[in-house]
Image (cartoon, rainbow, N blue to C red):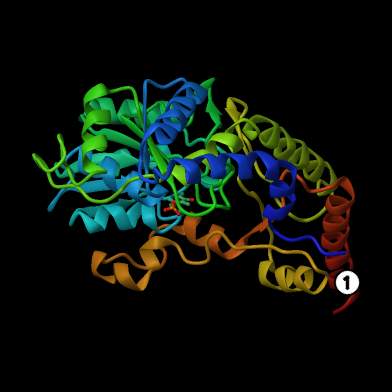
Amino acid sequence: MTVPLLDLKAQFDEIADDIRAAIDAVLESQQFILGPVVGDFEHAVASYCGVAHAVGVSSGTDAILASLMAIGIGPGDEVITTPYTFFSTAGCISRLCARPVFVDIDPRTFNIDPAKIERAVTDKTKAIIPVHLFGQCAEMDPVLEIARKHRLRVIEDAAQAIGAKYKGRDAGCMGDLGCFSFFPSKNLGGFGDGGMVVTNDPELAETVRMLRAHGSKPKYYHSIIGGNFRLDALQAAILRVKLRHLNSWTEGRRRNAALYDELLAELPVVTPHIEQHNFSIYNQYVIRVEERDRLRSFLKDKGVGTEIYYPLPLHMQKCYEHLGYHQGDFPEAEKAAADSLAIPIYPELTDEQQRYVASQIASFFQNRASSP
Ligand SMILES: *Cc1c(COP(=O)(O)O)cnc(C)c1O
């Protein structure tokens, strides 16, 4: 049996007719950049999340970049975030000539440890970017409390967390700005790149709207310097169709997670810890295991796809040597990079496939036990 890490074709087959009709409508209109289709999708996302404003942009990365630009981040500023995330969270800070300041993670959730944030605040700190990793929200109450106390902005990197909840509040809608990604492997994935900035602040929303079109309003009159961060109509049309299925896909992922929790319970692996007050959308199901690399290649031989999110924490990346961090600075992030493994969790996964994955993991440990 083969079980890929993700099977986008299975998802596409279920909705192909609706997607083709939506694409066709855009082709007939020949309006490809922004326009009413993007506007409709923005409204749909805003109402899905219960937030006042949603601004479609070209990627999750550009959502973060435009959000940082909207709050005026620039040279000399410091922005606190986690070293255990996709690169773009920190990369966007650096691109604005500001400095990413890392804070270690809580090993149970992989998210930024709020107890360690305050000691990283300096008089240069302007913002915090908590990342809701793998579909589970970071611990937002203490993050927001520290931000209030020190007058910092909060940008949520919710690229992996659309539809996730923290104490009943929606991912992306708790801080000043929230960033979604529609990269194909995200829970709501386009047929290319796409992203969204959400906010309840009308001024920030307007600024992001201007920034995505080179800071212009009206056209050809530039009061600020922005970029080309626009979402295109084809992606918006596809995503609008897919959004209608998002809740049922989330339920599928949650059902699969519950089955894995059960099937893996007796094995020497740590299954995901989801806080009681969190509703995870399981963008990834990440287990922790000693001998992670051996297990990974064993599963590969058995036809099971896995991935390592992320093999090298950001403070140890070559491009960040100049920040002056060292190995050992963020031990929990370093440990997670060494022992975490994402296994297939996509909604279309069958019961049989999941049982196969679990039984192969079990047989890995049986083989280890019986060989010296
Ligand atoms: C995917 C991702 C991004 C970037 O999104 P893109 O759409 O690929 O630019 C940023 N942060 C996190 C945590 C992500 O997972």
Corner quadrant of residue 319: bottom left
Across and down, in percent, residue 10 comes to: 74, 51
Corner quadrant of residue 316: bottom left
Within 10 Å of disc 1 (Cα), the crowding (few <14, some 14-19, many 20+) is few
Residue found at x 74% / y 61%: 4
Q: Where the N terminus falls, by quadrant?
A: bottom right
Across and down, in percent, residue 354 comes to: 83, 51
Is residue 33 shown left or right of residue 72?
A: right
Q: Mark 1 points at which residue?
A: 367
Is residue 251 shown left or right of residue 96?
A: right
Q: Is residue 38 visible?
A: yes
Q: Which amino acid does label 1 sit on?
A: Asn
Corner quadrant of residue 168: top right
Is residue 234 shown left or right of residue 69?
A: right
Across and down, in percent, residue 136 comes to: 56, 38
Across and down, in percent, residue 185 comes to: 58, 52
Residue found at x 17% / y 42%: 215
